[in-house]
């Protein structure tokens, strides 16, 4: 993911990059970051180390966004019904939906796909509010909407569980802690919006 540049053997530069990016005084502060995500993953092979690092980066980025809006569940539910119409506005619909989600307390970020993660999207609970990350896997507009709707389903139906667990990650594989019925319901919900 090009987080590190230069020689792979320049351990001093690697340590400085980690400390600078995360604002650490010591590289050992990294071990204190608790990452508890929920994601969507593909069937592609993945690396647990890369996924853990991705989780840490995403959590750090989400915490820095600091959405000041409280989570408004009723407003969130009403917003979901507008997704179908927004998908037809290819130029501005997606960004308008993300802004509206932000206004009701749900932060959404879109990142480039990181190889070896197989992650399509994830939902994190940070400071008691839902935060959704979407990876631009395949760089397809409909896929972003599909994953966004999928993750919103989990926020809508499993917020208490997510708050207790802290996360949900989505994939083609059966997701950790999820039943086949739960995932099928999420996919059907996303297809129906």
Image (cartoon, helix red, strand yellow):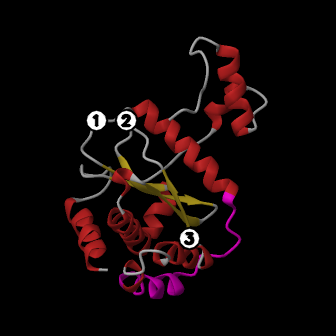
Res 106 label: 3
Asked if residue 39 shows in the view, the reply is no
Res 107 label: none
Please tell me which of labels 3 and 2 falls first in the chain: 3
Q: Is residue 17 left or right of residue 81?
A: right
Please tell me which of labels 3 and 1 falls first in the chain: 1
Q: Residue at x 75, y 38 (%)?
A: 23
Res 45 label: 1
x then y, percent, for residue 171: 30, 52
Sort mark 2 into few (<14), some (14-19) or many (20+) by Cα contacts within 10 Å: some
Q: Is label 3 in contact with label 2 (beta carbons under 8 Å)?
A: no
Q: Is residue 62 above or below residue 22?
A: below
Q: What is the magenta range?
A: 65-84
Q: Secondary structure at mark 3?
A: loop
Residue 57 magenta: no
Q: Separation of disc 3 and disc 2 at Cα?
A: 27 Å
Viewer-closest of 109 and 164? 109
x then y, percent, for residue 192: 26, 79
Please tell me which of labels 2 and 1 falls first in the chain: 1
Q: Is label 2 in contact with label 1 (beta carbons under 8 Å)?
A: yes
Q: Residue at x 44, y 38 (%)?
A: 51
Residue that lies at the very extreme toward the right in this rendered image: 25
Res 116 label: 2
Q: Residue at x 68, y 26 (%)?
A: 28
């Amino acid at each position: 993911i090009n987080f590190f540049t230069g020689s792979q053997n320049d351990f001093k530069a690697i340590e400085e990059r980690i400390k600078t990016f995360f604002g650490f005084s010591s590289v050992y502060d990294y071990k204190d970051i608790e990452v508890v995500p929920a994601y969507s993953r593909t069937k592609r092979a993945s690396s647990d180390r890369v996924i853990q690092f991705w989780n840490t980066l995403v959590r750090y980025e989400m915490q820095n966004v600091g959405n000041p809006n409280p989570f408004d569940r009723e407003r969130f539910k009403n917003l979901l019904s507008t997704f179908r119409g927004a998908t037809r506005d290819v130029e501005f619909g997606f960004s308008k939906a993300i802004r509206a989600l932000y206004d009701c307390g749900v932060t959404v970020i879109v990142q480039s796909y990181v190889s070896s993660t197989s992650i399509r999207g994830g939902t994190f609970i940070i400071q008691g509010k839902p935060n959704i990350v979407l990876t631009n896997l395949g760089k397809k507009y409909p896929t972003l909407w599909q994953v966004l709707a999928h993750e919103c389903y989990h926020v809508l139906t499993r917020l208490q569980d997510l708050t207790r667990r802290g996360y949900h990650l989505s994939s083609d594989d059966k997701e950790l802690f999820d039943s086949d019925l739960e995932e099928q319901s999420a996919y059907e919900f996303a297809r129906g919006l």
